Image (cartoon, rainbow, N blue to C red):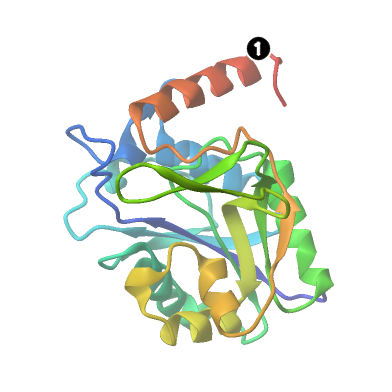
Amino acid sequence: MGNLMCWAIVPAAGSGSRFGGAIPKQYIDLEGIPIIVRTMNALISVEEISGIVVGISPTDKWWTKCAIDDHRMIGAFLGGACRAETVLRGLEYLEPKVDKDDWVLVHDAARPCVRPADIRRVIAMRANGSGGALLGTPISETIKYANQYSQVERTISRSNLWLAQTPQIFPYTLLKDALVNSDLRTITDDSMAVEAIGYKPYVIPGDSSNIKITTNEDLKLARLIMRNRSAGLLT
């Protein structure tokens, strides 16, 4: 891939309304360290990443208290009204530093359990073409489609179905073009925007421990994952 750089964007401008609580979920303590700091530490441990930026809310009072000492932490920018808008603003924030052929990696702030080895596997997919890649896990449970009354109408085949995770990686110019041409409010992940303009990103089998912390139950599971890793019971 030559000297093409890989930059990371961490959207963290959400309020975490589904989680509840006095502070946004990304700043909640996870085994002694804020969730977002654990996420950043995972990214920092990957030497292929050239620089990292984080998108925060205009009302954020907590980011400046997160001491992350690494020269690749470029800075924070103000996020938008939705996740996709925050990512687009991150691309614009990076623009003065980015070569047109560089790549960008997007990772959720609330996925602190991601394994650095999986981040490296996503980055390595740059060699497989220009459509990008994302982590995911195959769906193993039976999928039901229910109507508005919570009545099951049919069972959906789980064959070829995946749960999308992050990180996701794309050429900088491709992701920016995709988001600029999207209704940002409808975009739930970056791959969705890229798919909409005709590309087919690769999905890479990830690990079920790479959970997104959305509820208190997720936080309990993340604590268990971290404890087991500290004890050497999980990789």
Residue 219 x, y percent position in the rendering:
41, 27
> Where does the image place residue 15, in percent across and percent down from the top left?
24, 48
82 over 167 or under it: above or below: below
* Quarter of the figure with residue 41: top right
Is residue 46 among what the camera can see?
Answer: no
* Front residue of this view, candidates 84 and 195: 195
Task: For label 1, count other residues whose C-alpha is less than 10 Å away and answer few (under 14), some (14-19) or many (20+).
Answer: few
Query: Is 211 placed above or below 176 here?
Result: above
Q: Amino acid at mark 1?
A: Ala
Q: Position of residue 142 (x, y in %)?
A: 61, 38
For image coordinates 28% across by 68% down, the residue present is: 80
Residue 128 in picture, x, y percent from top left: 83, 71
In the rendered structure, the answer to whether residue 94 lies left or right of residue 100 reads: left
Q: Is residue 48 visible?
A: yes
Q: Residue under label 1, please give it.
A: 231
Residue under the image location 74 percent in, 54 percent down: 204
Q: Nearer the viewer, residue 138 or 2?
A: 138
